[in-house]
Image (cartoon, rainbow, N blue to C red):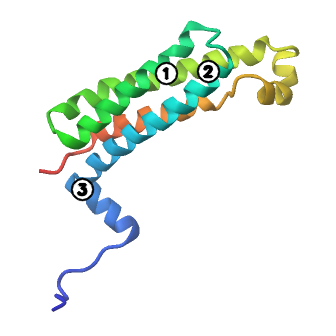
Amino acid sequence: MHDPSVETMYGIDRVLRNVRTGRFERSLSGLTAVGAMVTTAEIFFEHDKASFGNRWMWAPIVLGPVGAAAGLAGVCSRRAAKTLPLASATIVANGLQGLWLHGRGIRQKPGGWRNFRYNMEMGPPLMAPLLVTLVGGMGVLAAVLRREK
């Protein structure tokens, strides 16, 4: 029988309930793990195409699996989830560093910032490091949210 006192929630109401009860923290940890691996694969191919010309190109390749492991730990264990904030904050910092390095790469292209459109298309992708920052930000947010009992 359908109990009229129990209201089915949809959309944003359901998300907000999951945030309040702590269920969303585990989901966001899982999304962080998946996002870290997907972005790491993409970064590897892009940096490989550039022959890893700068040693800092290896940093997101190393940090991606660390973030994925911390995100997976956040899904599986309340205690292991404590590693997620440090790993995620490091990924955010690396993403911001990547933004600076990519901006510097555009500046060093012929015409620099005055030839912005061409150098954006042919130089290092300026917005790509922000995707890494977003993945790290999800992990930081997951670590801040309350966990379900």
User: Residue at label 3?
Assistant: 20
Question: Which residue is at a point 16% across and 39% down the rendered structure image?
Answer: 77
Query: Residue 148: which numbered mark, if any?
Result: none
Of 17 and 102, the residue lying toward us: 102
Looking at the image, is mark 2 or mark 3 nearer the viewer? 2
Type of amino acid at the residue the image marks with label 2: His
Point out the tag, 1 or 2, that comes first from the N-terminus: 2
Question: Which residue is at a point 49% across and 21% down the rendered structure image?
Answer: 60
With respect to residue 122, does 8 lie above or below?
Answer: below
Type of amino acid at the residue the image marks with label 3: Arg
Q: CA distance from mark 2 to mark 3?
A: 40 Å
Type of amino acid at the residue the image marks with label 1: Pro
Q: CA distance from mark 1 to mark 2?
A: 10 Å
User: Residue at label 1?
Assistant: 60
With respect to residue 69, does 58 lie above or below?
Answer: above
With respect to residue 101, does 69 lie above or below?
Answer: below
The image shows residue 54 at horizontal and vertical percentages of 61, 8
**Quadrant in which residue 17 is drawn:** bottom left
Query: Residue 47: which numbered mark, if any?
Result: 2
Quick check: marks 1 and 2 in contact, CB under 8 Å?
A: yes
Q: Residue furthest left?
A: 149
Left or right, 76 with reference to 72? left
The image shows residue 118 at horizontal and vertical percentages of 85, 28
Point out the tag, 1 or 3, that comes first from the N-terminus: 3
Question: Which residue is at a point 62% across and 20% down the rendered structure image?
Answer: 48
